[in-house]
Image (cartoon, rainbow, N blue to C red):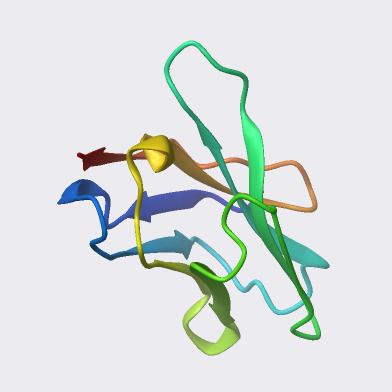
């Protein structure tokens, strides 16, 4: 079973940018889709963005136009470029696969 490790979280001011990475323990070439979700304090986990094996992307309305998801099959990695960050983006961000495997998460905090 593939293992996922996220990195790149941190503290950033409103309007700033962060790039999250998700390293997989094995090839992701054959995985139908990989995605990012997030969970804010006191809230349920929610979908953020998804990318299919052939590169099609889908975004939550709340992040559309600000976040960009990408994958590098050669490096077995998934990325999330987050621009124009808002305090409402504060959450633990997780990567996951179409197999239902989740990483441990990385904290993103956006200060106002």
74 versus 91 height, above or below: below
Q: Which of 42 and 61 is in front in this view?
A: 61
Residue at (61% x, 73% y) in the render: 27
Residue at (77% x, 65% y) in the render: 33
Residue at (69% x, 53% y) in the render: 60
Residue 82 on image: x %, y %: 40, 64
Q: Nearer the viewer, residue 95 or 83?
A: 83
Quadrant occupied by the C terminus: top left
Residue 50 on image: x %, y %: 70, 62
Residue at (16% x, 50% y) in the render: 13
Residue 12 on image: x %, y %: 17, 51
| Number of marks in picture | 0
Task: State left or right for residue 110 relative to residue 50.
Answer: left
Where residue 108 sits, quadrant-wise, is top left
Task: State left or right for residue 28 relative to residue 5.
Answer: right
Outermost residue, top direction?
Answer: 42
Residue 14 on image: x %, y %: 24, 51
Where residue 37 sits, quadrant-wise, is top right
Task: State left or right for residue 23 relative to residue 53.
Answer: left
72 versus 102 height, above or below: below
49 versus 106 height, above or below: below
């Amino acid at each position: 079973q593939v293992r996922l490790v996220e990195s790149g979280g941190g503290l950033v001011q409103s309007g700033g940018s962060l790039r999250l990475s998700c390293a997989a323990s094995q090839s992701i070439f054959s995985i139908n889709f990989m995605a990012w979700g997030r969970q804010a304090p006191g809230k349920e986990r929610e979908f953020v963005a998804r990318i299919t094996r052939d590169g099609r992307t889908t975004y939550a309305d709340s992040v559309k136009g600000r976040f960009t998801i990408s994958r590098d099959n050669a490096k077995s990695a998934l990325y999330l470029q987050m621009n124009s960050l808002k305090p409402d983006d504060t959450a633990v961000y997780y990567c996951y696969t179409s197999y239902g495997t989740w990483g441990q998460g990385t904290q993103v905090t956006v200060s106002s």
